[in-house]
Image: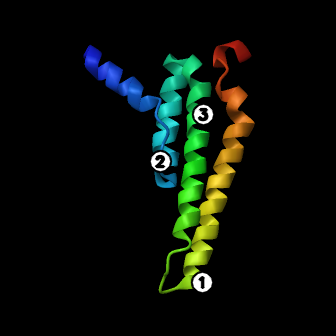
């Protein structure tokens, strides 16, 4: 990898994920690499992700006000999306310290 490529990779790895669809794969990959190569960047990364989740929740809430041809489905889907954001936020907060600690020091 070139120096520029490595720099671009680490910039990408430290940016929060903007959609819940990408949390499972993209967030997990970023966390994996940060924990192995830049452990000190994990806690700030989690903080940025939590901020992004607050923005996602706000966006979802405003989208709920838009009209839909199936209001019941729209409301049910919004409930699921908001619960997913809330659950992931709680999970991140509960595991922040564990995820930010060197796995070798725990052994």
Q: Position of residue 50 (x, y in %)?
A: 61, 41
Q: Is residue 77 left or right of residue 67?
A: right
Residue sitting at x 62%, y 75%: 76
| Residue placed most toward the observer, 85 or 56 | 56
Which residue lies most toward the bottom here? Answer: 69
Residue sitting at x 60%, y 33%: 46
Mark 2 and mark 3: span between their CA atoms?
13 Å
Circle 3 packing at 10 Å, graded few (<14), some (14-19), many (20+), is many
Q: Quadrant of the N terminus?
A: top left
Mark 1 and mark 3: span between their CA atoms?
34 Å
Q: Is residue 78 left or right of residue 95?
A: left
Name the element at disc 3.
helix
| Residue placed most toward the observer, 63 or 10 | 63
* Mark 2 vs 3: CB contact within 8 A: no
Residue 46's mark?
3
Residue sitting at x 51%, y 18%: 38
**Which is nearer the N-term, disc 2 or disc 1?**
2
Q: Position of residue 75 (x, y in %)?
A: 60, 76
Mark 2 and mark 1: span between their CA atoms?
26 Å
Can residue 53 be seen from the camera position used here? yes
Name the element at disc 2.
loop
- According to the picture, the residue beneath numbered tag 1 turns out to be 72
Residue 43's mark?
none
Can residue 107 be seen from the camera position used here? no
Q: Quadrant of the C terminus?
A: top right
- According to the picture, the residue beneath numbered tag 2 turns out to be 18
């Amino acid at each position: 990898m070139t120096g520029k490529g490595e720099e671009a990779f680490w910039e990408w790895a430290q940016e929060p994920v903007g959609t819940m669809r990408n949390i499972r794969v993209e967030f997990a990959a970023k966390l994996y690499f940060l924990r192995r190569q830049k452990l000190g960047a994990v806690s700030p990364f989690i903080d940025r992700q939590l901020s992004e989740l607050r923005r996602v929740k706000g966006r979802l809430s405003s989208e709920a006000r838009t009209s839909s041809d199936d209001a019941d489905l729209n409301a049910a889907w919004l409930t699921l999306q908001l619960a997913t954001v809330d659950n992931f936020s709680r999970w991140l907060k509960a595991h922040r310290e564990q995820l930010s600690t060197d796995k070798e020091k725990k052994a």
